[in-house]
């Protein structure tokens, strides 16, 4: 065995040189890894005893891509292109031996090999688009030469991880070898190649697929049309498509030039910086400074859910999906039956779309037990209360749970706003109480706010974060304050949106600006979707807000065919002259002289107070990191991932600009815009939220 460097070694097994990379955690293409490839392949080429070369990785996976942590830093060591050229121009067959995932640059390295073998559990993909990038090492030019343009655009614009079997069917992998015997299998394959004197197949020279696709621009036109909504606002998907088009229409080396030009644009742009930030932010949320990774956790074998309404039902589905039995409690049989029927209907609908088998549905439903007796939760390891948002009701329930549920269980509330410290006063074990704030629909939305109360114990926190991961959520550990993190920041935007439509904008102006910014919909369209009458009652209505007036007119949103917008039979929204008049009347009654408000002012007044509130949340220690706040807003409220979240966006705009604008608004409109001390401090020090 010859050590090439600290992450690579070359062993000669018979006629085969095996170059093994070992650079945890994912063998990313850092400078040492690129050096190991470049020098290791050269050493194998120069060794006359070696007739074929196997490139394999130790650890959990084949190369999982370029080393994202190197981006933006001065390059060192051989470039990825150098390492790839060493492989592709080798006079001996080079075989990539794939386990785990060959992703991004990893697959691009494998595509410069002459052959690829994999174990059945392996996956291949070009997920750069999820980092706001495109495969910048020839992937967009080589992939379509194997799988054709249609499959290639699908893979590069979604970043799919394709299983080895499908890769073999597509020709991405030449042979599947026995699971757990990759090294032996790859060496045997190498010997076979040599014995059969198979040619050195360079992917770059395979032109039949791209030539067959040439003259069919409809492949790309149809794909763009079908995905316009999904790709709205993103640069990377479109640039990926253009690279595949170049592979079809241009010679290889010209296509590479297109790829390099567009890659450079993306990698130096704000969208990719934002999406790379999110990639790491999603992994940071699980790191809790004051809850050590070895904190003991509570095994959760049985879950109790109180309330079989929309939230209780959705919450239950998360656990049923993870194979955890759920006992769901209601006060009336009819409500219980309705709740369970809704869960079943949701599963049946998913099965109709082919995402679940009927057997999956029955397995999940078999794990669900309905009851009217809280006593049936006695043996639950985790109980989640999801009843009406009323403090007295919740405290009454927690008092009962305290007497019923076994010691050591977690007592969680799904409240979205009530004070969990107060709820915890209803039990003798406040250390067991925590908030698990799911977002509706709870079985779909990825975000979970894990709300630690003053007395919540570390094992309860650690278990809650662990179970969140187990049920496929992305969790942010937050503190008790009005609205916790997500809704507290939302309140800033809602307040300004309501003020803006009195001062001169219309709901459709505010919605358009925020939609164009990248939100899936603006606040008024969202209100119409959710229903304007949430929390409203005819008896108590005073007509003192536009929303109340609309509810009194039975304009309660999409469900009544009108709200802030008028809706046609297909629920297409259009601005409403009725609403316009209501708004004008309201403004007149309040003596407001309406004025024209620019889109820029709408955006800054809606977004900058959100950033400022995030800074206050950090000051108060109600969130651990600025990037956690970004994760909350991206996964709970549809903040566009290519803008990185409110805090990252503040850094992108420049905190000095945000501060200056907040001060300007404060002078004009008062202390709703009072800058937080942290914002002032960061600007004074020339720092960013990311530096915290
Ligand atoms: N670079 C640097 N670090 C990486 C990394 C990467 N590419 N991928 C993962 N890590 C770190 C991650 O931050 C975490 O660190 C640890 O590895 C485990 O990751 C030229 C330009 C491979 C499926 O987009 O999808 O190639 O938190 O928790 O759940 O065209 O990691 O432990 O300190 O996610 O088992 C393209 C990204 C790059 C793949 C494994 N490649 N990675 O998932 O572990 S751009 C990607 C993943 C590129 C070329 C272009 C996943 C995984 P820490 P993990 P996992």
Image (spheres, rainbow, N blue to C red):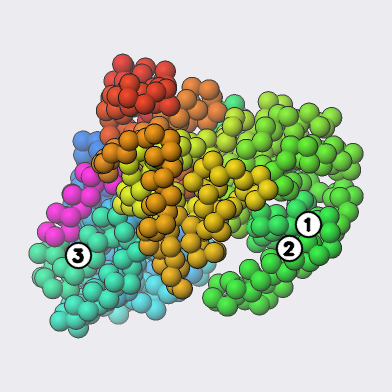
What is the spatial separation of the Cα atoms under label 3 and label 1, in whole angstroms?
A: 51 Å
Q: Which residues are magenta?
A: 257-279
Q: Which of the 4 image quadrants contains residue 110?
A: bottom left
Up the image or down, 200 lies above or below 398; here it is: below
Report if residue 619 is visible in the image. yes
In this view, the residue in front, 314 or 64, is 314
Q: Are marks 1 and 2 in contact (CB under 8 Å)?
A: yes
Q: Residue at x 21, y 39 (%)?
A: 75
Q: Is mark 1 within 8 Å of ligand 1?
A: no
Q: Residue at x 87, y 41 (%)?
A: 400
Q: Nearer the viewer, mark 1 or mark 2?
A: 2
Across and down, in percent, residue 645 comes to 40, 41
Instruction: Write down the residue under mark 2.
Output: 339
Q: Is mark 3 within 8 Å of ligand 1?
A: no
Reply yes or no: does residue 499 show up in magenta. no
Across and down, in percent, residue 37 comes to 28, 51
Instruction: Write down the residue under mark 1.
Output: 328
In this view, the residue in front, 232 or 551, is 551
What is the spatial separation of the Cα atoms under label 2 and label 3, in whole angstroms?
A: 48 Å
Instruction: Write down the residue under mark 3.
Output: 242
Q: Is residue 411 left or right of residue 627?
A: right
Helix, strand or loop status at disc 3: helix
Counting residues from the start of the chain, the first of labels 3 and 1 encountered is 3
Q: Residue at x 19, y 70 (%)?
A: 245
Quarter of the image that includes the C terminus: top left
Report if residue 607 is visible in the image. no
Q: Residue at x 27, y 76 (%)?
A: 222
Packing grade of label 2 (10 A; few <14, some 14-19, many >=20) is many
Helix, strand or loop status at disc 1: strand
């Amino acid at each position: 065995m010859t050590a090439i460097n600290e992450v690579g070694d070359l062993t000669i097994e018979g006629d085969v040189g095996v170059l093994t990379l070992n650079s945890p955690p994912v063998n990313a293409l850092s400078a040492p890894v690129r050096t190991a490839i470049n020098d290791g392949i050269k050493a194998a080429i120069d060794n006359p005893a070696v007739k074929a070369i196997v490139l394999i990785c130790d650890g959990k996976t084949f190369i999982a891509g370029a080393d994202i942590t190197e981006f933006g830093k001065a390059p060192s060591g051989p470039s990825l292109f150098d390492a790839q050229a060493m492989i592709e121009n080798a006079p001996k067959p080079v075989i990539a031996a794939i386990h785990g995932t060959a992703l991004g640059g990893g697959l691009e390295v494998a595509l410069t090999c002459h052959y690829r073998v994999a174990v059945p559990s392996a996956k291949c993909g070009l997920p750069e688009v999820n980092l706001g990038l495109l495969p910048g090492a020839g992937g967009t030019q080589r992939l379509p030469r194997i799988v054709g343009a249609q499959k290639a655009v699908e893979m590069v614009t979604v970043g799919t991880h394709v299983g080895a079997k499908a890769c073999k069917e597509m020709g991405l992998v030449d042979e599947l070898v026995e699971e757990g015997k990759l090294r032996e299998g790859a060496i045997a394959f190498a010997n076979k190649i040599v014995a059969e004197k198979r040619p050195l197949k360079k992917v770059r020279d395979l032109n039949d697929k791209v030539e067959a696709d040439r003259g069919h621009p409809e492949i790309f036109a149809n794909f763009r049309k079908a995905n316009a909504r999904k790709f709205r606002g993103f640069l990377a998907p479109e640039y990926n498509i253009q690279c595949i088009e170049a592979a079809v229409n241009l010679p290889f080396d010209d296509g590479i030039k297109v790829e390099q030009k567009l890659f450079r644009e993306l990698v130096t742009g704000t969208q990719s910086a934002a999406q790379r930030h999110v990639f790491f932010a999603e992994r940071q949320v699980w790191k809790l400074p004051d809850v050590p990774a070895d904190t003991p956790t509570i095994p959760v074998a049985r879950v109790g859910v109180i309330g079989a309404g929309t939230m209780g039902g959705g919450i239950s589905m998360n656990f049923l999906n993870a194979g955890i039995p759920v006992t769901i409690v209601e006060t009336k049989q009819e409500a219980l039956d309705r709740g369970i029927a809704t869960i079943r209907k949701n599963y049946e609908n998913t099965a109709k779309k082919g995402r679940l088998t009927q057997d999956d549905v029955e397995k999940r439903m078999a794990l669900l037990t309905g009851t009217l007796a809280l006593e049936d939760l006695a043996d639950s390891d985790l109980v989640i209360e999801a009843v009406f948002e009323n403090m007295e009701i919740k405290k009454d329930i927690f008092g009962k749970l305290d007497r019923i549920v076994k010691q050591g269980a977690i007592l969680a509330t799904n409240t979205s706003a009530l004070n969990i410290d107060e709820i915890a006063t209803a039990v003798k074990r406040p250390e067991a109480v925590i908030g698990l704030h799911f977002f509706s629909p709870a079985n779909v939305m990825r975000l979970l706010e894990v709300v630690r109360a003053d007395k919540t114990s570390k094992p309860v926190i650690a278990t809650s974060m662990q179970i969140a991961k187990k049920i496929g959520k992305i969790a942010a550990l937050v503190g008790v304050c009005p609205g916790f993190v997500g809704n507290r920041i939302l309140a800033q935007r809602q307040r300004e949106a309501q003020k803006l439509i009195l001062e001169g904008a219309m709901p459709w102006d505010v919605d358009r600006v925020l939609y164009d910014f990248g939100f899936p919909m603006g606040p008024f369209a969202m209100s119409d979707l959710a229903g304007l009458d949430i929390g409203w009652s005819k008896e108590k209505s005073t007509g003192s807000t536009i929303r109340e007036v609309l509810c009194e007119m039975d304009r309660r949103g999409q469900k009544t065919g009108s709200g802030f917008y008028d809706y046609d039979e297909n629920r297409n929204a259009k601005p409403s002259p009725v609403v316009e008049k209501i708004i004008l009347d309201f403004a007149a009654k309040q003596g407001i002289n309406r004025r024209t408000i620019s889109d820029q002012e709408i955006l800054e007044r809606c977004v900058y107070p959100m950033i400022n509130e995030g800074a206050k949340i950090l000051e108060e220690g109600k969130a651990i990191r600025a990037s956690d706040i970004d994760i909350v807003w991206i996964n709970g409220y549809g903040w566009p991932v290519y803008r990185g979240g409110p805090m990252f966006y503040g850094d992108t705009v420049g905190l000095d600009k945000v501060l200056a604008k907040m001060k300007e608004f404060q002078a004009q409109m008062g202390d709703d815009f009072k800058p937080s001390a942290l914002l002032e401090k960061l600007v004074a020090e020339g720092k960013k939220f990311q530096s915290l």
